[in-house]
Amino acid sequence: MIRYENVSMTYPSTRGRPPLKALEPVNLAIEKGEFICLVGPSGCGKTTLLKISAALLSPTQGNVVFNGAPLNEPSRSIGVMFQKPVLLPWRTVEKNAYLPAEISGTMSSAIAERVAKVLTMVGLHDFATALPDQLSGGMQQRAAMARTLAYEPELMLMDEPFGALDEFTRETMNFELSELTHQAGITSLFVTHNIPEAVFLADRVVVMSPRPGRVSGIVEVPFPKPRTVDFMRDPGFTELTFEVRNILSEAESSSTRVAEEQP
Amino acid sequence: MSTYTVPDQDTGADVELDVFIDERDPERWKWRAISIIVVLTFLAIWELLPRLGLVSTIILPPVTDVWAGLTELVMQDTFPRHLRVTLVEMLVGFLIGTLIGFAIGVALGVWESVKKSVYPLVVAFQSLPKIVLAPLLITWFGYGIESKIAMAVVIAFFPVLINTMVGLETVPDEARQLMRSLKASRGQVFRKLSLPHAAPFIMAGIKTGLTFAVIGAIVGEFVGSSEGLGYLLHAYGFQLRIDKVFAVIVVLSLIGAILYFAIDWLERRMIYWRTDSSLV
């Protein structure tokens, strides 16, 4: 579905500051229908990699291949969810969900029906005509999810979408997301720094090292989907979170060593 | 509905409660009454000071004399003409000023190159006290209505310009990225994101511009004119008809207040969402 070939990123120097190397060459292939979680410490280039996947940034080197073709500009088959809900406050929930279709000029009654269906799926059926600022933070992020799901992307990119939510809401949102993406067969790339969240959602957890980011390990999560709270009680769940944690701390200590070796 | 944070009775931890309550101040009638009393007291002092001979009636005519002057003024045959002239100057000046301010504001807010090349000139113009242009505008446009319109335009366009520019520039990055990820064209970004985002800013600029247009028209009339409320004010001042001067001031404040409330009403109709929201 999407393949990264030696993708690296160096931000050019600004205002006398030296250029910032954000990503070491990354190689990764994501299969159709897979749910990939990207974990790593803050500033490890997770968001950079996600933006490159959305073609909002172009890598300094390497290629991203999406559906067999190089990805040079944003694609309508790729949906993005940001850290903030990014809803337009003057549009109702429903009209926010119409936005992608309006922009691509494909707005139709079929889209309106699909939006209504998706809003029901995310539990916002009764809030279709509410303005975003009348909703709680969790509901706003649900509305953003509905907007992304309504245009049926093949690949969904999510940058810590539930990071600002409280623990309970976050957990509920994770259950729902797991179920929705599984049902719709959407390929997902989900950035987080919450390890249990990553293990719960992912088919594979991709662990990144501190800056400059590179893939320091991949942990497979061989548990059936959709997953429920039972999975979190499974000893295998705990084991996998420890495995991810170990890779993270190894990557961290080796990068500190590298830093100390530098003159 | 509003959210209140209250301590939990058992644990003391903060709990958020969504409650429906009447959020209007329960003491609002009390404060309304007090504010009316303040106004009445003010008017009473105004009436009494000249009546008791503490202030000359030439300097401060009693309120009742001003009221008599006001009724006399509005009954005059020439009053509708003066009123019309000033209203036309204000409103036409305001409209042209708003359009110019909006157009330049959009150009500055949308194209970085335009901003870099034109903005210094705009700032230089703004630092000029524009009243000094009044004699010049009268030389250019004559004694009639045109020079007053020009004066209103010159001082009304700037707040619209600045607010339009700032409104367009403060579109949050995340929202721009969303639009890019949806492959929106520049025109779509402008119509569906930038312009609605800037609307509250623009409306605030228009409100200020309206107040400024009123000032511009009156100042223009002061400097040189043969009709209009500013002209009347000036003329009555020379004749020491201070009651009439106050009467014209009352009329002008009424015009200002009516225009302001009209635009305020329009603003509340147009900007129906909360603008302090952190959604985008």
Image: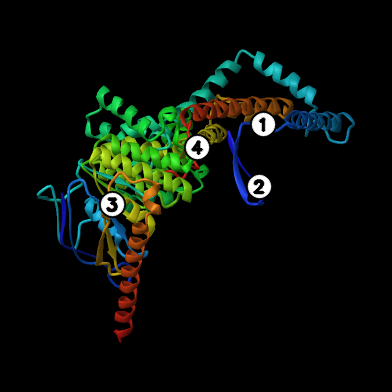
Cα distance in 3D space between marks 3 and 4: 45 Å
Residue B144, percent from left and from top: 47, 27
User: In the figure, is residue B57 to the left or right of A205?
Assistant: right
**Residue B8, which numbered label?**
2
**Looking at the image, do the residues carrying marks 2 and 3 touch, with CB atoms under 8 Å apart?**
no
**Residue B24, which numbered label?**
1
Cα distance in 3D space between marks 3 and 1: 55 Å
Cα distance in 3D space between marks 1 and 2: 26 Å
Discs 1 and 4 carry the same chain letter: yes
**Looking at the image, do the residues carrying marks 1 and 4 touch, with CB atoms under 8 Å apart?**
no
Q: Which residue is mark 3?
A: A223
Cα distance in 3D space between marks 2 and 3: 40 Å
Question: Looking at the image, which residue is at 37% across and 44% down?
Answer: A175
Q: Amino acid at mark 2?
A: Asp
Circle 2 chain: B
Q: Which residue sits furthest front?
A: A235
User: In the figure, is residue A245 to the left or right of B61?
Assistant: left
Quadrant location of the N terminus of chain B? top right
Question: Looking at the image, which residue is at 70% across and 16% down?
Answer: B72
Earlier in the chain: of badge 4 and badge 2, it is 2
Q: Which residue sits furthest right?
A: B52
Question: Looking at the image, which residue is at 33% across and 56% down?
Answer: A199
One can see residue A108 in this view: no
Q: Which residue is mark 4?
A: B274
Discs 3 and 4 carry the same chain letter: no
